[in-house]
Each structure stands twice: as structure tokens, then as C-alpha cells.
Image: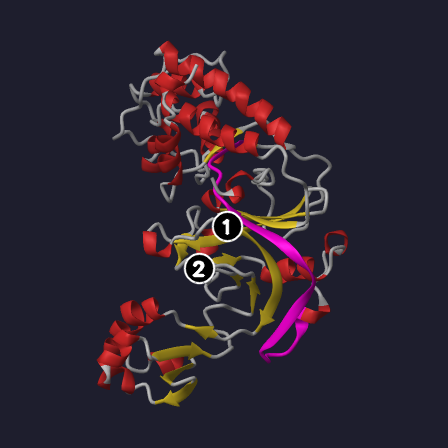
Amino acid sequence: MRRWFYLWLAFFGFWWASGAVQAQTSTFAPARQVELLQEARQRFLSLAKSNQWQPVDKHLCLVACEKAPEVPGLKVLLQLTGDLPAHVSEKDSLFDDTLIEAVRRFQRRHGLIPDGVVGPQTLEALNVSPAQRLAQIELNLKRWQLALAQPAQRMVFVNLPDFSLHLLNETGQPVWRTNVIIGQTNKDFQTIPMESQITYLVLNPTWTVPQSILRREIIPLLKHDPNYLTRNRMLVYRQDGAQRVQVSPKELFSNPAGVAKGIYWVVQQPGPTNSLGKIKFMFPNLHDIYLHDTPNRTLFAHPVRAYSHGCVRVQNPELLGSYLLNPDWAETGKSSPLLKDNSLNKKITLPAPVAVTLAYYTAWVDEKGDLQFRNDLYGIDKQERRRLDISLDTLH
């Protein structure tokens, strides 16, 4: 099992405002997470064996002040999950304010938009059986248990299923959180979980378009929009021995065999439309994955943010850069003056390498004591459950 998978720094579940520095007085040590998840495990084990849980009609859609015969069953389910107080009567069929708030709490615990509406995504999460949740808890509990010996260190931590990035100080204390966009669920574009060290960052970077994107997306796009490269400040180069020679974009159409062989490279120049934005963060790995800014800010508002081709887009890259360049940044919250440079392409080596972890945690207990679940976007949980033979029959 890869070591990254069990880093105790995994994820603390704090829903902090993006971009705001947050000083915390407490955190969850691995031992505490193990304790809390073991308690959750026992609750779900009992629930799975009790036959009390019943699914909700998958076609149900409830909004405020509606009455429906399915409401009593929804109340029972939310009481079993702990989102609705046990004293609330389940006989009333009105979707009232108390029930709406319980739905919102459930939605927050599952990474959904907390709008209080029982729609398709909320129904899908509600209808995950206790046995399935038990297996999910068990899998993540094993990760925390195997992480107990991991030392605390200064780190950039990304929890892929939660689309979040956390900064941790030397004692493992979380000091800041922001949103991220990760790779698509398509296997070719998934963000690979890993651990490495960020060694430098690049201001106003160029972007060399990967060959797969050039062939699959850029070439077909040019057939309908021949000015796309010029409009987006993209230059075309042909590999000529050890050198790359700038050529006309027309060569991409006149030499399809060369395109197939990968002898052409498209490089986007720094600027407001550059796909990497104003800054990228580099760490050695075999998959050419890195963290970077993005000119497309609207996607950060989406609850599920799996849109990239594998790299991790950061919502507040300047604050991340300030932390990497200045360990005391969390106390001031001020952006580093080194990041206020002009539009020139510039490499900045960090004073010391900073650990970075891209991990995959789908269950944890947050600082409020709420059990959090996230979807298994990449199917990693499914693979691990099969390998470890985790099921209701094997859990006691």
C-alpha cells in the first residue's frame, strides 16, 4: 500500500471561508480520529444488523412546506443517521423547517449543496445503505490506524474527494483551507494520489500543451476555430533534433503524420488567458502533475470540481505561494512581495522544500464531531474494499 494513502495529516474537514487565514486551537490527532471512527463503526455496525434502515423513494423530490407520504420514512432515516433529533415525531407528513434543517445537516456532511431540498443527489446519498457506509468507515479507519506513526511536518495537503487544500504547520496544525479543482473521473485525466516536495514555483508561467490534449482537443477545435491559437497566445514548435523550431500553425494540418508522432508542441505564452494562470507550484513526480492558478474562476463555485486533465487548480494561489515562501505567513496573512512581480516569466526557488500530499479520504470526523462522507470519485475505495475483502459478513 502506498504510504501517501495513510498520512495522518489527511483531512480535518474544516469548512473555512476560502482565502481567509484561520488559526485553530485544536486539531484531530490520528489517535483521536481512530477513536471517533471506531465509535462510528460500532453505530453503523449495529444499524446495519438491525434492519431499521429503509431506502427512500428514489423518485421523491421535496421542497419546503410540502406534504408527502414518504416524509415519515425520511424522518426515520435522518434520525438513524443522527441528523434529526430522536424526539421529533415521524408521524407528521409535512416537510417542515425542522426536517429541512436536518436535510441541510445531512447535505453538509456529504459535501452537497446545503439547500434543504431533497433532490436526486441528496436521495442518492440518503440511499447508501448502512452496510455500505460501514465498509467506507472501515476502509478509512484502516488508513488512519496505519498512519499513527507518521510524524507531523509542514505540508500542503490536498484531499481529492473533498476538493480541498489545507496548509499545515510544523506541528501538523491546520492554518488555512481553500478549494481546488482536480482531475476528471475519466481514468486518463484523474489526479494521481502521491506525496512529494514542492521545491519551486513559477510566476507568469508558460503552458506546454500535453500531446494528448493537442491531438484530442486542440486539433479538432482548430478545424472550427482556426484563430484559436492566435487568440490565446499559443505558439507552435516543431521538434528538430535536439531543438524546437517555431513554425506556422498551418503545419499542424499539413503534417498529420508528424502530429501523430508527437513532433509538434504548442506553447501558450504568459498572460490573462494562460491556462495555468499567474503561478504554478512544482514538485517532482512521474505524472507531470502540479498545482497551479487558473483563469476560469467560476468552476470553484461548483460542489463537485473534477474538471482538470490531472493537475490541481488552486482557488487562492497567491496565499499558497506566500505560505511556501514565508513560514510565518499564517500570522500576518499578507501576500509575499515576491509574488507581486511584473508579467515576466520567473522561477522562485523555495527557502526549503515543503511536503505536498495528494490523498484520497472519503470518511472522517470533523471538528464539530460530525461524521463526513464523500463520494468515491475515482473508484479507489471500491478497489481497496475488494482487495481487503471488506463487507458486512467480514465485520464484527
Which SS class for mark 1?
strand
Above or below for 132 versus 120: above
Q: Which residue is mark 2?
A: 287
Q: Which mark is residue 374?
A: none
**Residue at coordinates 58% horizontally, 35% vertically from top-left?**
147
Picture coordinates of residue 11 (x, y %)?
A: 56, 40
Picture coordinates of residue 202 (x, y %)?
A: 58, 70
Q: Quadrant of the C terminus?
A: top left
**Residue at coordinates 41% horizontally, 14% vertically from top-left?**
47
The answer, for residue 93, to whether it is visible in the render is no
**Residue at coordinates 65% horizontally, 55% vertically from top-left?**
354
Q: CA distance from mark 2 to mark 1?
A: 10 Å
Q: Are marks 2 and 1 in contact (CB under 8 Å)?
A: yes
Graded by Cα atoms within 10 Å as few (under 14), some (14 to 19) or many (20 or more), the crowding at tag 1 reads: some
Q: Amino acid at mark 1?
A: Met
Q: Identify the coloring.
A: secondary structure
Q: Amino acid at mark 2?
A: His
| Total residue callouts | 2
Q: Which residues are magenta?
A: 339-364
Q: Which mark is residue 194?
A: 1
Give the side of residue 343 with respect to residue 220, left or right: right
The answer, for residue 209, to whether it is visible in the render is yes
Confirm whether the magenta stretch covers residue 57.
no
Give the side of residue 314 with respect to residue 94, left or right: right
Which SS class for mark 2?
loop
Picture coordinates of residue 88 (x, y %)?
A: 47, 14
* Residue nearer the viewer, 172 or 269: 172
Picture coordinates of residue 210 (x, y %)?
A: 38, 69
**Residue at coordinates 43% horizontally, 78% vertically from top-left?**
267
Main SS category, magenta section: strand
